[in-house]
Image (spheres, rainbow, N blue to C red):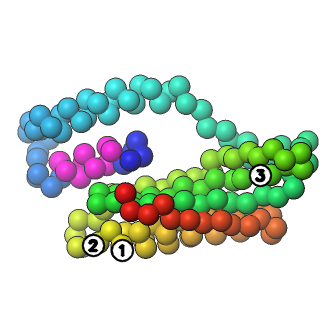
């Protein structure tokens, strides 16, 4: 599960329990929160490449790669830029990701969440493709239920 979604799920659980600001949380939620905050400190070690294009390299093809998935508690999509260079090397760069917790007000199935995350992935990929060159292709896939 993506890192931010864990915090969103915890907040959603607190909301469902109708806890006030000064109410104590259960041991289970407290332990998951403490585990999440420990992992938060490790994120500073990660860097995301923000430069998509190297204008000195000879690129053979460029495409957006989209992946989406859903489970009982959340759904999401991620988009990568994939470049194949004329020398045969391949590079990928993170473009964007969206992650959402399962809506509570509506009874939904994993199949419906998969459909929703596929739509989210397609919509995100299309909007990024329109901003890029007209020759950019899209490859989209669903990871299946987790």
State the residue position of label 2.
Answer: 108
Disc 1 packing (10 Å; few <14; some 14–19; many ≥20)? few
Is 8 included in the stretch rendered in magenta? yes
Q: Which residues are magenta?
A: 6-14
Of residues 55 and 22, the one nearer the viewer is 55
Disc 2 packing (10 Å; few <14; some 14–19; many ≥20)? few
- Dominant SS type (magenta): helix
User: Residue at (11%, 47%) from the top-left corner?
Assistant: 19
Q: Secondary structure at mark 2?
A: loop
User: Residue at (23%, 65%) from the top-left corner?
Assistant: 104
Q: Is residue 70 visible?
A: yes
Which numbered disc, 3 or 1, marks the residue that appears first in the sequence? 3
Q: Secondary structure at mark 1?
A: helix
Is 133 included in the stretch rendered in magenta? no
State the residue position of label 1.
Answer: 112
Q: Is residue 6 left or right of residue 127?
A: left
Q: Secondary structure at mark 3?
A: strand
State the residue position of label 3.
Answer: 83
Q: CA distance from mark 3 to mark 2?
A: 37 Å
* Residue 57 on image: x %, y %: 89, 44
Q: Are marks 1 and 2 in contact (CB under 8 Å)?
A: yes
Disc 3 packing (10 Å; few <14; some 14–19; many ≥20)? many
Q: In the figure, residue 135 lies in which quadrant? A: bottom right
């Amino acid at each position: 599960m993506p890192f931010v979604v864990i915090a969103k799920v915890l907040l959603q659980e607190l909301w469902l329990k109708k806890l006030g600001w000064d109410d104590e949380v259960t041991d289970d939620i407290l332990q998951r929160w403490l585990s999440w905050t420990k992992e938060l400190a490790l994120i500073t070690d990660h860097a995301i490449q923000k430069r998509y294009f190297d204008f000195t390299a000879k690129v053979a093809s460029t495409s957006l790669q989209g992946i989406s998935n859903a489970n009982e508690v959340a759904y999401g999509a991620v988009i990568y830029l994939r470049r194949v260079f004329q020398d045969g090397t391949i590079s990928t760069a993170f473009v964007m990701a969206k992650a959402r917790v399962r809506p509570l007000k509506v009874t939904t199935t994993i199949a419906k969440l998969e459909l929703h995350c596929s739509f989210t992935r397609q919509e995100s990929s299309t909007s990024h493709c329109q901003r890029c060159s007209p020759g950019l292709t899209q490859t989209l896939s669903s990871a299946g239920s987790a």
